[in-house]
Image: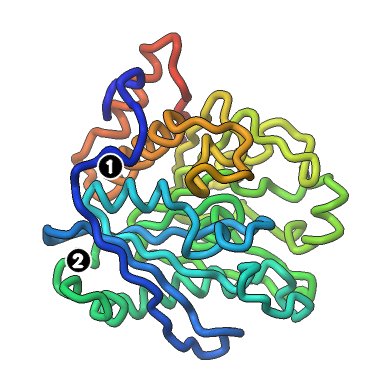
Amino acid sequence: MKNQDQISVIGLSSNPVITYSPIVMPVSGRPADIHLKVSAPASGNNLPVVILSHGHGASTYLSSLRGLAPLTEFFSSKGFIVIQPTHPDAKLLGLDTTGPEGGLFLKSRAKDIHFILDNLDHILARVPGLEHRADKSQVSAIGHSLGALTVGMLAGAEVTDTLGETISLAETRLKALVMIGAPGGPEGLNGDFALTHYPVLKGINYTSMSLPTLVINGDRDINLNFSNVENWRADPYYQSPVASSLLTVFGAEHIYGGISGWDVAETTDESPQLVAFLCESILAYIRSAMDPSDKSWAELQKDFQNDPDAKARIDNK
């Protein structure tokens, strides 16, 4: 990874990428067909794959395959195939939110990632020239906000819904799992808005997590609609019983400088440098998760420890 002071902004890469969307596929039992976007380097083979899970939020388009553009552009320029689904909770789909899953569609969200893994060959074949360029043994998942909870479910977190069903959808085919700004545990869920509108969040159980995960927490990511507990969003790290990592980003609020999209109104801590820093940090973790001999993550932790002005701290267990 570059020195922290040398990181500038994303979007200056000279590596051309291609984007293909929408790929529309029927899914049995899903309330709507799944829509996917695929981005990839214009050249190269044996490309690892990253699946991005968007958040919920009030935005019509950011909470869909159109969101997380900075992450998409960064990872595709770094040699990854990036796949983005629009989950059923997306506002633009206008689906009924009074059904058994409620408005967050948590079970369907996790099943979307399972579907992508089950149908990876078919998805890649839909993109001209991409079918034989992927390393399908190297697939990772990154999620932000509700997308982070989605990734947590893939890591083994269980959720008991309001009807009493316990949802367990761990996915061992993923090489790396990254949770950015996830909801914390039910013990700290004390915001009236969330308790009223998203009661399913009271059923989260991070103690059932069974796969190593990178949990990312901004130390200024506090939303009183959900919780007034400091570092509540670090709960997945502390409550998980398995070896995992925690990246605490100093000064970061919920959008981490603007990861949900370029120049968007929901960003309260606009900083292209923070976005680039976060992306570079996640890349270091994924590289080391894909290749046990890779030292990127360990070297990043050492850099932070040796820098009194470090932008973040890494804890491992």
How many badges with numbers are in the image? 2
Choose between 89 and 172: the one closer to the eye. 89
Residue at disc 1, secondary structure: helix
**In the figure, 226 relative to 269: above or below?**
below
Q: Quadrant of the N terminus?
A: top left
Residue type at the position of mark 1: Ser
Is 178 placed above or below 133 here?
Answer: above
Say which residue appears at 33% left-offset and 26% top-offset: 7
Return the x and y of residue 126 as percentages of the image width and height: 27, 80
Q: Residue at x 50, y 54 (%)?
A: 143
Work out whether 86 lies above or below 12.
Answer: below
Q: Residue at left 68%, top 38%?
A: 232
User: Left or right: where does residue 91 sit relative to residue 66?
Assistant: right
Display colour scheme:
rainbow
Question: What mark, if any, has residue 39 been given in the picture?
Answer: none
- Say which label, 1 or 2, has the lower sequence index: 2
Q: Is residue 136 left or right of residue 263?
A: left
Residue 19, given in percent of the width and then of the height, sits at 30, 64
Q: Quadrant of residue 118?
A: bottom left
Q: CA distance from mark 1 to mark 2?
A: 19 Å
Q: Quadrant of residue 150?
A: bottom right
Residue 129's spot in the image, x, y percent?
A: 16, 73
Mark 2 residue type: Ala
Judging by the rendered image, the residue that carries numbered circle 2 is 134
Label 2 packing within 10 angstroms: few (<14), some (14-19), many (20+):
many
Label number found at residue 288: 1
Q: Secondary structure at mark 2?
A: strand
Residue 253 horizontal side relative to residue 277, left or right: right
